Image: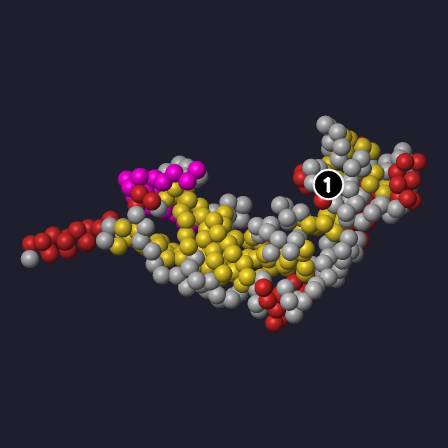
Amino acid sequence: MRILRFLAVVIVLTNVLFAKAHEGTFKLSEFRDGRKNSFDTNIEVRYSIDVLMGEPVVKADAKYTIGDFVDIDGHSYKRTQLKKERLDKLKIIDLKIRAPFETTSINKQLYIDIDMGAMGKAGEWSYNTPGSPDWNKWIMYKDGTYLNKEDAIKAYKGFLRLGINDTWVSLAKAITIKYDISGVKEKKLEPLKNVWIDKETGLMWQDEEYNQEEVDNYVKYYEQEKNVGKTGSWYHADEYCQKLRLDGFNDWRLPSINELSSIKDKRNNFVYQVVFRNIWSSDTAGDEAKKFRFHYYIQGDEPIALNSKTRVSYIKCVRSKKLKKE
């Protein structure tokens, strides 16, 4: 009887010590991992964390939606190219994530790994039973090293949330994500034309060949404001991208310097290579009244240079890989 009373006291004290259970949600927005057979997806995670009998108890499940693009055998297709019965066959069949663990107790970024359990169809919550991890193998540092029990308990006492401000994008990491796209591979689809998609950044680039008239315009009229198609002044370039309608998309824009820099070593992926082309960017440099903009050189050790907005350069438009059609 004394033993039972002692255990009851321990349980009560434990529940008082960890009286507050934590729950919340966070999101993986436009998540993609660049595989040749996958699809863009938005994932929402809901979680609850409690302590029972002195040990942590974690429950989490996930719900996902199909994004704007599906990648099949290395080609990208718009979601609108797929009939509903085929879209319904797209699935995530396995999902494990590494979630940022926010706490006021330890001044370092911490993480926990969560198995989302049995995944269902898009729009359905997965099924997951609560798990009871060991304190010594639950919360980890960025390098994967686990906190010891004492520090893990300390971190839990100062718990704020999983995710960052309830939205988890750049810090999101899928340990495992497996797709089932077998239902859409039965019929040959026509891939996107005249564009190249950077799987690493998710950016879609205009990928049309420069014709001879455009090349001649750059070579012969570099110091004059003459506009021909995909060559011309910065003013022409800005308007050209805003008015561009390509592959059904209408939200093209001039790329930033950082975006242009991101393709410098990937230029051989383009159908039309951009080697030795000077391409306008959207970034401002110096005094705006002097009509200068950054001017991007793909080749060479110094890729960035100032150029008068009225001079002629090449144009290559870009868009974020979200579906926005006319």
Q: Magenta span has 153? A: yes
| Residue 243 point in image, percent of width and height | 80, 53
| Residue 213 point in image, percent of width and height | 92, 44
Out of 107 and 87, give the one closest to the viewer. Answer: 87
Q: Pointer 1: residues within 10 angstroms few (<14), some, or many (20+)?
A: some
Most extreme residue toward the top is: 301
What residue is drawn where x is 71% and y is 37%?
A: 264
Image quadrant assignment for residue 67: bottom right
Could you tell me which quadrant the C terminus lies in?
Answer: bottom right
92 in relation to 253, above or below: below
Could you tell me which quadrant the N terminus lies in?
Answer: bottom left
Instruction: Answer whether residue 322 is visible to the viewer in this image.
Output: no
Instruction: Answer whether residue 202 is visible to the viewer in this image.
Output: yes
Most extreme residue toward the bottom is: 85
Q: Secondary structure at mark 1?
A: helix
Question: From which residue to which does the magenta span run?
Answer: 143-162
The amino acid type, in three-letter code, at marker 1 is: Arg
What residue is drawn where x is 41% and y is 37%?
A: 108
Q: Magenta span has 38? A: no
Q: Which residue is mark 1?
A: 267
| Residue 198 point in image, percent of width and height | 67, 47
What residue is drawn where x is 44% and y is 39%?
A: 142
Give the left or right position of residue 152, taking residue 194 as reference. Answer: left
Give the left or right position of residue 215, taking residue 241 as reference. Answer: right
Out of 46 and 242, give the one closest to the viewer. Answer: 46
Out of 46 and 105, give the one closest to the viewer. Answer: 46
| Residue 49 point in image, percent of width and height | 35, 54
